[in-house]
Image (cartoon, rainbow, N blue to C red):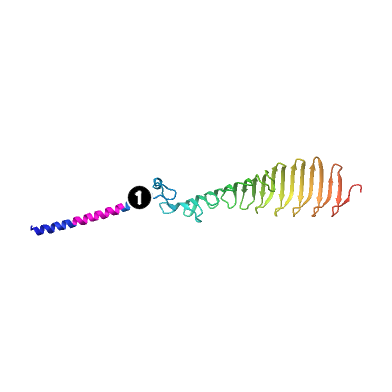
Amino acid sequence: MTVEERLERLERELLRTKRRYRRIFVGACLGVGLWASLAAVGQTPGPGQTPETAAKEVRAKKFVLEDDSGVVRAVLGMDRAKEGPGLWLFKEKDKVAAFLRISPEGPLFSLTQDAQSSLHMKATVDEQSLTLSSGESRPYILLRTRPDGPSVNIRTGQAREGITLWAPTSPTGFQKDWSTIQLYDDQDKLRAALSIGQLGPHFGLLDANGKWRAYLSLIESGPGFHLFDENGLGRAALTLRKAVPSLTLSDENKKNRLTAGSPDYSLALFGPDGTAVWRPGK
């Protein structure tokens, strides 16, 4: 082999070696760059983070869990209105079985067996409640606390008739600190109420327009029974105050037209202007 041939062979080997090391250098540079990028993403502190805690956190806007068939079974993220975070669990496709959500009013928690049977819990500034609903469309039990007092509501059947137990803590139609049992018709209107408070027990009946029509009470001075017309005006009263019975009948102008009572068991009739037109012995 001549000297020229050896020099050409040596140049080819040097060229191959140079190319090999160039590829190694480029690969090493890319590896270092990728490593540096991943380290920067994992360790760059976010709002409220420190370099020591940044690497321990995972940040995302939404997490979705799918089963082996690709059906979504759980979602962790913001609600559709972007008002608060929530966790939704799905029994099957698009059917929510449970969720926990933070709304602007407060936290909400719900368990659902089907379209109607469910349990709901809610906590807001003014109300904390637990609702139990059966498989029918309307029945439910509602336990609730509000500024006006705790209550239990029971509704049965597809209509809305039911019972409410309520202990008011603020002035209402039943006065403050009275406990009541209320009965509602199928139009969700109050029709009867039994209450007890510092003045004693009371029982009232209302018509479909929400007007009191009959009222029975027992106060310290004695029992009383009152009847009202369709306008809510008292038209008849039978009382026994301090062992003295009395009967009063009134007209639509709130004028007494007949009074009868003890201790002398007198009877009096009055005209439209309230003037007595007849008394015993006159």
Q: Nearer the viewer, residue 55 or 134?
A: 55
Q: Position of residue 122 (x, y in %)?
A: 56, 48
Residue furthest to the left: 2
- Tell me which residue sits at (21%, 55%) in the image: 20
**In percent of the image, x 74 and y 44: which residue is there?**
217
Does the segment drawn in magenta span residue 191? Answer: no
Estimate the x, y position of residue 193 in percent, counting from the top left: 69, 47
Q: Residue at point 15% right, 58% down?
A: 11
In the displayed structure image, the side of residue 95 where residue 144 appears, left or right = right
Q: Which residue is mark 1?
A: 39
Find residue 220 and report its image quarter: top right
Residue 6 rendering spot, x and y as whole percentages: 11, 57
Rendered residue at 82%/45% (across/down) = 246
Element assignment for label 1: helix
**Dividing the picture into quarters, in which one does residue 252 lie?**
bottom right
* Image side of residue 94 versus residue 137, left or right: left
| Residue furthest out toward the right | 281
Q: Quadrant of the N terminus?
A: bottom left
Q: Who is closer to the viewer here, 173 or 3?
A: 3
Q: Is residue 22 magenta?
A: yes
Image coordinates for residue 7, horizontal then vertical, percent: 12, 58
Marker count (numbered): 1
Q: Residues within 10 Å of mark 1 (few under 14, many from 20)?
A: few
Residue type highlighted by circle 1: Ala
The rendered magenta stretch, by its main secondary structure, is classed as: helix
**Picture quadrant of residue 180:** top right
Q: Which residues are magenta?
A: 16-32
